[in-house]
Amino acid sequence: MRPVNKTALVTGITGQDGSYLAELLLEKGYRVVGMTRRSSTASMERIAHIEDQIEIIQGDLLDQASLVEALQKVRPNEVYNLGAQSFVPTSWNQPVLTGEVTGLGVTRMLEAMRQVDPSVRFYQASSSEMFGKVRETPQNEWTPFYPRSPYGAAKVFAHYLTVNYRESYGIFAVSGILFNHESPRRGLEFVTRKVSDGVARIKLGMAEKITLGNLDADRDWGFAGDYVKAMWLMLQQDQPRDYVIATGKSHTVRHLCDTAFRHVGLDYRDHVVTDPTFVRPAEVDRLLGDPSRAREDLGWRPNVSFEELVAMMVDADMERLWEHKGSSRKNSNVSSKRASTSSNGSSRKHVPASTSHKS
Ligand code: NAP
Ligand code: F7E
């Protein structure tokens, strides 16, 4: 790969999208610097495989000075602002934090850019959640917003801040309005991963049921690996513009369950139960994106279909849990052997990536 001689600063590099974007930028020959916040335990599992190819700088979207310092030290050509409190239900429990990180965080970053170097190109991770109680279907770049959660409201604020800094200061700032995108690296609390993980557990005899909320919710689901390409393309254009990124097809949560269970030869009706605990105070019933502008201007198209995405996620969870089961068996054999020879022999328990359940 020919070096492009460009540097990218990625906030949220430890998240699902950050990991795919970092891989893409490395492939393109970028120097990639990821901003991570201080934590007592590392959350680097999604980028462990590329850790030796990227640089990490500490910073937090809650702390303006850390963003200024990051920009001064890294001197990026492009900033991808992916950092956020991104789980919608948490935004009702922690609305102020969500507003601070997901909303005001972008103001802090844009102000830092204005102070350090206004020529830096800026990508803001906007969201289809901004459409909320939709005003029209499908949704495009002109569809009015009607957010239904503190998360959606924070993203609307961040979106307009991005537009405003472009119009007020001429900063090359763009907003990608991305519809739901998933992958085997998706957090376990999001519905696609909750289902793929649950299906794998049930198939492997580790669980019997999955408990979900609203099965009638309809989403336009794509593959995260496809969507990060659109982020990069947006920053390579001559003119800054906002884009809807979606597949143009939607499916209900019920259909997601049906597809995932069928993939392993099971019937979702035997295993899925619902619980009002998982129903949201205000729901976004149906999202369906129209990615025509992205297709025309960027030449962007999704490559992975819904069925391929679900199969990919279920297969990845089957493999992960199978390996975990295998290593647990091996460990318990070793520890029972040790126990029979030594009363205080200890065995190290293998803890694979992303196994904690949050919802
Ligand atoms: P994710 O997996 O939840 O990752 C979020 C990232 O933000 C993590 O790296 C997290 O770091 C970081 N972060 C949280 N609080 C922070 C703070 N105070 N300062 C700096 N970083 C902080 O989310 P994702 O799915 O990759 O999504 C990436 C972005 O796209 C988010 O802004 C999300 O809202 C937006 N988005 C996502 C979708 C989607 O379907 N995935 C659709 C539209 C928009 P830790 O590892 O330390 O927690
Ligand atoms: O929910 C329904 C739930 O949490 C999808 C984030 O990346 O995409 C994501 O937000 C739908 C909702 O994603 C369960 O009510 C039913 O209608 O996977 P989700 P989300 O809320 O759409 C947008 C674009 C973002 O920007 C966000 O950052 O599924 N649902 N039962 C459930 N959802 C969850 N999580 N858990 C359930 O048990």
Image (cartoon, helix red, strand yellow):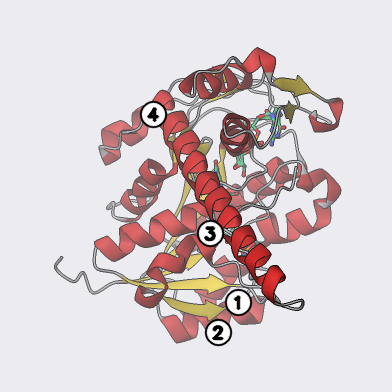
Q: Between disc 2 and disc 1, whose residue precedes?
A: 1
Q: Residue at x 25, y 37 (%)?
A: 299
Residue where numbered disc 1 is placed: 59
- Estimate the x, y position of residue 338 in percent, counting from the top left: 65, 71
Which percent across, then down, holds residue 44?
54, 67
Say which of marks 3 and 4 sits in front. Answer: 4
Mark drawn on residue 165? 3
Alpha carbon of mark 1 to alpha carbon of mark 4: how far?
36 Å
| Foreground tag (1 vs 3) | 1
Which of labels 2 and 1 is toward the front? 1
Label placed on residue 269: none
Identify which amino acid the numbered label 2 is placed on: Glu
Q: Secondary structure at mark 2?
A: helix
CB within 8 Å, label 2 to label 1 = yes
Name the residue type under label 4.
Glu
Residue underneath mark 2: 69
Tell which tag, 2 or 3, sits nearer the viewer.
Answer: 2
**Real-space CA distance between mark 1 and mark 3, rounded to the nearest whole angstrom:** 22 Å
Q: Nearer the viewer, residue 321 or 26?
A: 321
- Quarter of the image with the C terminus is top right
Q: Which residue is mark 4?
A: 308
Q: Nearer the viewer, residue 180 or 100?
A: 180
User: Is residue 246 something one can see in this rendering?
Assistant: no
The answer to which quarter of the image holds residue 119 is: bottom left
Tell me if label 1 and label 4 are in contact, CB under 8 Å: no
Q: Nearer the viewer, mark 4 or mark 2?
A: 4
Q: Earlier in the sequence, mark 4 or mark 2?
A: 2
| Residue type, numbered disc 1 | Gly
Q: Earlier in the sequence, mark 3 or mark 4?
A: 3
Measured Cα–Cα span from mark 4 to mark 2: 42 Å
Q: Upstream in the sequence, badge 1 or badge 4?
A: 1
